[in-house]
Amino acid sequence: MEKALLSGRLAPPPAALKGFTRLVAGSEYCQNKLPDLKTLAALRRRAPVTLATSILTDEGLAAVSALISAAFRRDLIDEVIVNDWGLLQPLKKLTGLALSAGRLLCVELSVAEPGWTKKFLLEYGITSAETDDKKMAERLKALGLEISWHAPHAFKAVTTYCPFEKHFKAKCGFSCEGRALKLKNPHLKKPLLLVEKVYLTPDASVKPPAGISRLVVRGKGF
Amino acid sequence: MKFTVGVKSADEARYFLENGADELYCGLAGLLNNRLPRENLPGVSGAEEIIRLAGKKRVFLAVNEIVPAKLYGPALDILKGLRRRGLFGVILRDPAFLAFLRAEKFSLYVTLSTLALCFNRGALEFFGRLGINRLVLPMQLMPENAGSLLKNKFGIETEVFCQRLYYGVNVDSMCFLPCPQTAESGSRKFPDFTCLLPFKCRGGEFRMPMPGPEYMMNAFYDFYHGCADYVKIARWPNTLRQADLFHKVRYLVKLLEKGASRKLFVHEGLKIDSKPLEYGKSFTFRPAGPASRRA
């Protein structure tokens, strides 16, 4: 099983990469948290790179499409995690780029009618899927997808309104960089963790279920 | 801008039609949609009655969840039966079910639910190829990012919420926190309102943020002038609260129709009390009755 480090927008210190054979840059939850080409080049010198992408506005879609196209041409990335229906068509022309259905898209794909879903996956060349949920992993495996397991935090909710900077814009000051807010309330059994634009819980087993191809771990400070 | 209003009963349909609803939608028990089961009509005859009451006005059926394959046949039968009775359209979220209806050459008007992740022109193109006629903009998509959807090249109509009075703190279909909308017990206790809880964190207190009222008023002004075709008044457990929302939004739209300037519109809109419409206060199940007819 491959072990990948979720590194976000910036290059992690070399020591953080110990034990990992792949880097997942970018974010499944915030369109602004994209690495630039220079960072991707630095990451690529250390390990193969997957680029994670989120729900996108028009401006975000244009920026992400351009970045992916340029990074793939320079051989800086070999895989993209997609969470937006609108990104699939622009990526279709990038032959050889591996696509993985992100955790948001998998909410839909894992329960949609399997016949249609298999055709859809084939049409867009999606061969793997991201999840932190065991039942969902089973359903996605049944569709013939390779599974990337995210741990130890499970996805609970996402917003497009930045909780740190309080806006909907496709450009920001990266105020969330390195910040993870642990949110506690006596009415909740477990605290929530806020990073970027996503609320997570410490629910995803670090020990992945059987048949998983990749374990993705969130790096400290990313 | 026309009014699309969700209803739970014939009583509510009558009330909203008499008070200016341009079209109605409803849900049926057994056909998945994104509301509490008790907000659905118990049987097809309920929907037929609403279609009859609406006369020439349009009625839609909400089936806005991912539809399991085993429900395709029964759902199609129900839709065909209701179409014969005058059903105008269906509100969907599931691309697989959209593709199925298209393959069946089933020609109802299709509204893409706000729950579908359609935040940009590429996503609209994807769903456009599946034959949608209208898009309900995601509640968290603001006019500053919605230009290409409001004025799209596919002739797809658009529907919006009045976010000053009706807003989801997180992306609606991508929030799996406890919520009164999904709480089976309907306890409405604190854990059911996660998005409203005060949290403690390093550095003090935290509440899940939402844009301020002034921003929201400006957004609705921009949606109107950006040519959004419809405003949606969603079904709600508490009919009086829904009627309150309806009348407040109607007042705002009237201001816009009279040509209110942005400054005046925002000023007037900020005077509206939005407290009764907040999540925690409005999720008590109180269906329409004589009281709502007096509202």
Image (cartoon, coloured by chain):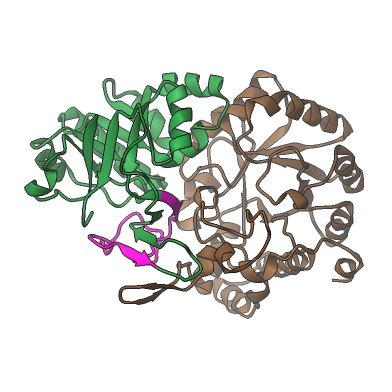
Chain colours: A green, B brown
- Horizontal arrangement in the rendering, residue B62 relative to residue B43 (left or right): left
Above-or-below relation of B11 to A121: below
Which quadrant: the N terminus of chain B? bottom right
Name the residue rendered at 47%, 45% in the picture: B119
In-front residue for pair A212/A118:
A212
Q: To which quarter of the image does residue B278 belong?
A: bottom right
- Determine whether A31 is above or below B194 in the image: above
Question: x, y percentage for residue B237?
Answer: 74, 60
In the displayed structure, A37 sits above or below B265; it is above
Q: Is residue B22 left or right of residue A138?
A: right
The stretch of residues the image draws in magenta is A155-183
x, y (%) of residue B85? Answer: 88, 33
Is residue B55 magenta-colored? no
Please tell me whether residue A170 belongs to the stretch shown in magenta. yes
* Residue A70 visible in the shown view: no
Residue at 60% from the left image edge and 53% from the top image edge: B227
Residue A83, horizontal then vertical, whole percent: 40, 39
